[in-house]
Image: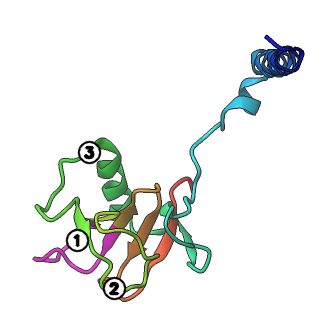
Amino acid sequence: MTRYQSRVAAVLLALLTTLFAGLLTASPAQSAPASPVAVAQASCGDTSGFDVVALSALPPQATDTYDLIQQGGPYPYKQDGTVFSNREGLLPSCSSGYYHEYTVVTPGSSTRGTRRIITGDGGEYFYTGDHYASFQLIDVNA
């Protein structure tokens, strides 16, 4: 091993030792977030232009739908969980299959109604109460 290679190896070893020591002494709050991000950013586009609405401010059936999504179902309609293609172009432009839609039940309606939650693969949740004419970004922790 040359003198240069020995110095590089020594520097790398010192950096790794310092990094490892820092990881061992870091408090849990420094090494991992305490809770999931409340409002996720689409990994394929900007969500900053959307109004943000608290999940708790939506109709109570939206929370029911959110809970079902977290549990993986079962869903009340066979269309729930299917790909949402964003034909309206109102959500950030993402690859096919990025978004999925879920029905927010409308009490008294004999159909699926107009309310949906759209999820993105980046962890974001959107609400529409008017069948895709407009969307709000959901803060799932509020």
- Crowdedness near tag 1: few (<14), some (14–19) or many (≥20) residues, C-alpha within 10 Å: few
Q: Which of marks 3 and 2 is nearer the N terminus?
A: 3
Q: Is the magenta stretch mostly helix, strand or loop?
A: loop
- Whether tag 1 and tag 2 are in contact, CB under 8 A, the answer is no
Neighbor class of circle 3 (other Cα within 10 Å; few <14, some 14-19, many 20+) is few
Residue drawn at point x = 83 percent, y = 14 percent: 2
Marking on residue 130: 2
Mark closer to the chain start, 1 or 2: 1
Q: Give the range drawn in magenta.
A: 102-117
| Disc 3/disc 2 C-alpha distance (Å) | 25 Å
**Above or below: residue 83 compared with residue 12:** below
Q: What residue lies at 43% left-to-right and 69% top-to-bottom?
A: 126
Mark 1 or 2: in front is: 2
Residue labelled with disc 3: 72
SS category of the residue bearing label 3 = loop
Q: Do the residues labelled 3 and 2 touch (CB within 8 Å)?
A: no
**Screen quadrant of the N terminus:** top right
Where does label 1 land, which residue? 107
Quadrant in the picture for the C terminus: bottom right
Q: Residue 135 appears at what percent x and percent y? A: 44, 79
Q: How many marks?
A: 3
Residue 39 magenta:
no
Residue 14 disc label: none
In the depicted structure, whether residue 46 falls above or below residue 7: below
- Name the residue at the front extreme: 2
Q: Which of marks 3 and 1 is nearer the N terminus?
A: 3
Which mark is nearer the camera, 3 or 2?
A: 3
Vertical position of residue 134 compared to residue 1: above or below = below
